[in-house]
Image: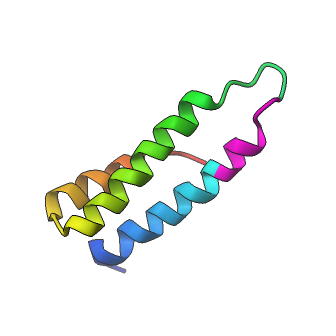
Amino acid sequence: MMTSLGSALPAEIDRVRRLWGQYRDLRGQPGIIVEPQIALMDAAITAGLDAIGSGEIVAMFAAYHRLKAFRE
């Protein structure tokens, strides 16, 4: 099924927000460093929201792929 970028990008933002929460819950665990990944997720989520707000298709496409790169 094909979806539009206008619906796929918000879905990816939501997915990465959930993943961000999982990483946040790992803070303070011995031997687990999550701060760099959390910072990268924050930046990607912000870029996605900014792209949606601007309506720039190229920025939305770049943000979508940046978010898609985060694995669960």
Left or right for 32, reference 5:
right
Identify the residue at horizontal 55%, vertical 34% (top origin).
37
Is residue 23 covered in magenta? yes
The location of residue 67, given as percent across then percent down, is 41, 51
Residue 68 seen in render: no
**16 or 42: nearer the viewer:** 42
Furthest toward the top, the residue is 31
Determine whether 31 is above or below 14 in the image: above
The location of residue 45, given as percent across then percent down, is 43, 53
Identify the residue at horizontal 68%, vertical 24% (top origin).
33
Is residue 37 covered in magenta? no
Determine whether 57 is above or below 37 in the image: below
Q: Quadrant of the N terminus?
A: bottom left
Identify the residue at horizontal 40%, vertical 47% (top origin).
44
Determine whether 55 is above or below 29 in the image: below
Q: Quadrant of residue 58?
A: bottom left
Residues shaded magenta: 21-28
Magenta span: chief secondary structure: helix
Q: Quadrant of residue 24?
A: top right
All told, the count of numbered labels is 0
**4 or 54: nearer the viewer:** 54
